[in-house]
Image: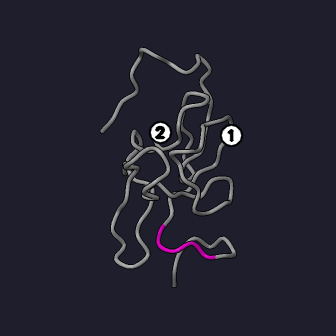
């Protein structure tokens, strides 16, 4: 869907992150939301009520459509999270459980 522009790079350092158990290369310091928009299914979460797919939208922390689990912490705004080596990300499905289960039952 989206691809990274070559010009205006943040750094030349490529790092490895894990998204939903799959390893991906990303640029150190880029917004996590930008990475999610390049990785199928191009979304961040599903809504708790209808299960509708949501993707990063505003890219500045206002809309909350980009919520993901980062390093075990649920409801993290991916647009405000910078990529770093070893980052572990899981797309949220439904309402996050306070104990970290991540889905509603």
For residue 15, which quarter of the picture?
A: top right
Image quarter (top left, top right, bottom left or bottom right) of the N terminus: top left
Q: Where residue 12 sits: x, y (%)?
A: 58, 16
Disc 2 to disc 1, C-alpha distance: 14 Å
For residue 65, which quarter of the picture?
A: bottom left
Secondary structure of the magenta portion, mostly? Answer: loop
First in residue order: circle 2 vs circle 1: 2
Please indicate whether residue 67 sits to the left or right of residue 2 in the image: right
At 37% from the left edge and 49% from the top edge, which residue is drawn? Answer: 57
Q: Where residue 18 sits: x, y (%)?
A: 59, 45
Q: Nearer the viewer, residue 29 or 16?
A: 29
**Does residue 66 lie above or below 84 as drawn?**
below
* Tag shown at residue 86: 1
Mark 1: few/some/many CA within 10 Å (<14, 14-19, 20+): few
Bounds of the magenta segment: 93-97
At 68% from the left edge and 59% from the top edge, which residue is drawn? Answer: 72
Farthest residue to the bottom: give it.
Answer: 105
Q: Where residue 34 sits: x, y (%)?
A: 45, 38
For residue 101, which quarter of the picture?
A: bottom right
Tell me, yes or no, whether the highlighted magenta stretch contains residue 96: yes
Please indicate whether residue 24 sits to the left or right of residue 40 in the image: right
Please indicate whether residue 58 sits to the left or right of residue 104 in the image: left
Q: Secondary structure at mark 2?
A: helix
Tell me, yes or no, whether the highlighted magenta stretch contains residue 30: no
Q: Where residue 99 sits: x, y (%)?
A: 69, 75
At 54% from the left edge and 57% from the top edge, which residue is drawn? Answer: 68
* Tag shown at residue 35: 2
């Amino acid at each position: 869907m989206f691809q990274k522009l070559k010009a205006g790079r943040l750094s030349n350092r490529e790092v490895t992150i894990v998204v939903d158990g799959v390893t991906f290369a990303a640029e150190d310091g880029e917004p996590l939301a930008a990475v999610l928009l390049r990785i199928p299914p191009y979304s961040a979460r599903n809504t708790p009520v209808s299960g509708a797919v949501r993707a990063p939208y505003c890219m500045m922390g206002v809309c909350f459509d980009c919520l993901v689990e980062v390093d075990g912490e649920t409801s993290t705004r991916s647009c405000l999270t910078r990529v770093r080596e070893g980052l572990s990300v899981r797309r949220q499905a439904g309402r996050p459980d306070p104990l970290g289960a991540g889905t509603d039952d």
